[in-house]
Amino acid sequence: MDFAPLLQADRGQTARAVTLLTPDGFEGWLTRQSVAIRALATAQRFAAKPNTHLLIPRDDDVAVVAGVTDPASPWALARLAEALPEGTYRLDGADVGANALGWLLGQYRFTRYRKADDTAPRVLLTRDVGHRDEAIRLAAATAQVRDLVNTGAGDLGPAELEAEAGALARAHHATVTVTSGDTLARDYPMIHAVGQAATRDRAPRLIELHWGDAAHPRIAIVGKGVCFDTGGLDIKPSAGMRLMKKDMGGAAHALALAGLVMAAKLPVRLHLLIPAVENAVSGASFRPGDVLKTRKGLTVENTNTDAEGRLILGDALTRAGEEAPELILDFATLTGAARVALGPDLPPLFTDDETLAADLLAAGVAEEDPVWRLPLWDGYDEMLKSDIADMVNAPDGGFAGAITAALFLRRFVPKDTAWAHLDVFAWRPSAKPGRPKGGDAYALRAAYRMLKDRYSQG
């Protein structure tokens, strides 16, 4: 979706004024209005409650008064962008600032499988042209995650993720390499094992993108790319499989974040890694009880074929560490335990690096894109013990499922490398203004803000 026409530079164009009011400020505003406006507000039962608005006749047009919880929130204008008549608008007495994101995403629509509505765009004017470009990039990155996650698995497999990475590389003069077939089986045995049951046109692969000056600090972004997850031979029930098109949500986040980093020209050497598979069921499926080799040289007793995401990430994290990055971030729709603990809106953050944890938490607050830190509790590491291999992929009992999954991943990260794991849901189960039900980005803006704060020049 092209968001640029929805947020335009303010050059004095004719526009409808938009005034934002909190419920606490409503009475003061009302006393300053004419008798006619007070009567209109009373008749419409308008009291500046959040996500409500009042259209006030002005000459040959209207002005808008909108109720918001926080005028500075990124989502303050989201409901207006969904509900106002087509036309051009300008905030009264303030510039757009963070409000731009909600205005843009309030007009997001996923139209791949049905005709787009014929609603004309609502345009917002801004005096901060530099912030305009950043807001458009953030909205486009969020929309990219939404579009990828919303796309049915029949239309988005490992090959399509590879194509998405290729398009990103062409846009930013990056390079892409793809490992598949016998080379994948030899060099990335866990990625191969998880994806080996899929049909040939959906064969597993490791997708890597490299960008930036080799003299700059090296960072790696890793995204889980399970394009559909049946659960394998430990097959999911139908209700559990219903949304498994979204199991590549980590890859969608990684692609979007990589695009933001490159568009901002951050002074980093970027390494994007996406292990892309379909966890299918066939005679070639890997089995419970199989002992898997890994790129790192460890052996893993597979106790659950539905705990496949951590397997493919293990090989990808090993590869990322071989380039000696100073920072690794991974995104994955990894565990149902994370949803039980924190629900859909709060992605768990796992890291042993106190500075990185503080930076990500602060960025989440600043961007209203929160994360919540959970412990990499060393005491639970023994749950990964195996009687016959170096470790299991999924401990029995189900205790601390999100933590033990993160501890599994930690075994594949170099000890001297700052690393954070984000267990994102990638799905919004109910709509909010600017955030429709369906695929969505979580912790994307927080991660980008953290990287900007760390690496921006000047």
Image (tube, helix red, strand yellow):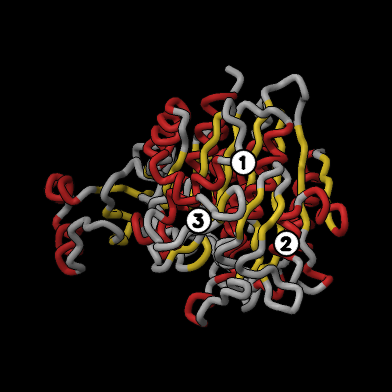
Can you say whether 80 is above or below 259 in the image? below
Of helix, strand and loop, which one carries label 1? loop
Mark 2 highlights which residue? 193
Q: What kind of residue is marked 2?
A: Ala
For residue 304, side relative to residue 98 (left or right):
right
Q: Which mark is residue 105?
A: 3
Q: Position of residue 303 (x, y in %)?
A: 56, 63
Q: Residue at x 17, y 52 (%)?
A: 34
Q: Quadrant of residue 252?
A: bottom right
- Looking at the rendered image, the quarter that the C terminus falls into is top right
Disc 3 to disc 2, C-alpha distance: 39 Å
* Quadrant of the image occupied by residue 72: top left
Of the numbered discs 3 and 2, the one sitting upstream in the chain is: 3
Amino acid tagged 1:
Phe
Circle 3 residues within 10 Å: few <14, some 14–19, many ≥20: many
Q: From where the camera sits, is residue 15 visible? A: no
In the displayed image of the protein, which residue is found farthest to the front? 387
Residue at the spot of label 1: 412
Q: Which residue is the extreme one toward the top? A: 458
- Asked whether, in this view, residue 297 is left or right of residue 46, the answer is right
Can residue 127 be seen here? The reply is: yes
Q: In the rendering, which numbered label is found on residue 12?
A: none
Viewer-proximal residue, 59 or 309?
Answer: 309
Contact? badges 3 and 2 (CB < 8 Å): no
From this view, report whether residue 179 is shown above or below residue 447: below
Foreground mark, 1 or 3, reads 1
